[in-house]
Amino acid sequence: MLQPKMILCDLDGTLVDSVPDLTFCVDAMMERLGRAPRGEAAVRTWVGNGVEKLVCRALTGQLEGEPDAADYSLAYPLFLELYAENTYTRSILYPGVREGLDFLASAGYPLGCVTNKAAQFTEPLLTHLGIRERFTLVVSGDSLPRKKPDPMPLLHAADHFGVMPAEALMIGDSVSDVKAARAAGFGIICMSYGYNHGEDIRDSNPDAVIDSMVELKGLLAPLA
Ligand SMILES: O=C(O)COP(=O)(O)O
Ligand SMILES: [Mg+2]
């Protein structure tokens, strides 16, 4: 059994299935630009590196595409406007998340949320889903100069909680979470159901892969 002194949870693809809202906004943005919608299957492979990157991917239809600067400067504010109105209309917690968070709280773990989603969306989404108060610390994609896969947000959280990185655990869904955790010296458990750009997260060799946050009960020993 693991017994970290602090746990950080990723947001999109780990706690929340946010793809329905993100797809709605990508497709509405494309429509307003007079272009064809991209659809949910594509958007699902594009989430996890923040809003700017999602807009670049939507415009180019590619994971690493660089859009025309003029296109981007038209599209980005449109997307922000659309997502502000559709942050939590269609987004839901994955099965087992509430019970998993209940377990982590009752087991005495200090909890933070570290996401690449911009703070203007992270806060209302967590609040609307009724889980904002579960997290003592929320670090969003634009809270610090660098986001995941950089270790900066994880190290910032470890420092905030006064915990050594080796005693900290990240729970995520993507290769960015694994890379950030490894670079920070954290442990890393991944959810099998999340967004990982169409790849199996097992290929990134996290310490464990689970199908539901309820399974944390079998992996983590209570702190208190
Ligand atoms: O890409 C995003 O906006 C957020 O992704 P994350 O919550 O999985 O870090
Ligand atoms: Mg994620």
Image: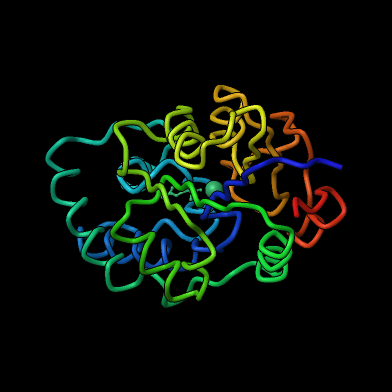
Give left or right: position of 89 versus 166. Answer: left
The answer to whether 96 is drawn above or below residue 166 in the figure is below
Q: Residue at 55% of width from left, 63% of height from top?
A: 16
The answer to whether 96 is drawn above or below residue 111 in the figure is below
Q: Locate residue 11, reporting x and y percent.
A: 52, 54
Q: Residue at 74% of width from left, 29% of height from top?
A: 205
Closer to the camera in the image, 100 or 168: 168
Q: Locate residue 130, reporting x and y percent.
A: 50, 75
The type of colouring in the image is: rainbow
Q: Quadrant of the C terminus?
A: bottom right
Q: Residue at 71% of width from left, 65% of height from top?
A: 106
Q: Quadrant of the N terminus?
A: top right
Q: Residue at 38% of width from left, 59% of height from top?
A: 122
Q: Locate residue 8, reporting x and y percent.
A: 57, 46
Quarter of the rendering containing residue 179: top right
Quarter of the rendering containing residue 27: bottom left
The answer to whether 26 is drawn above or below residue 154 in the figure is below
Q: Locate residue 47, reporting x and y percent.
A: 47, 48
Closer to the camera in the image, 96 or 199: 96
State how many labels appear.
Answer: 0
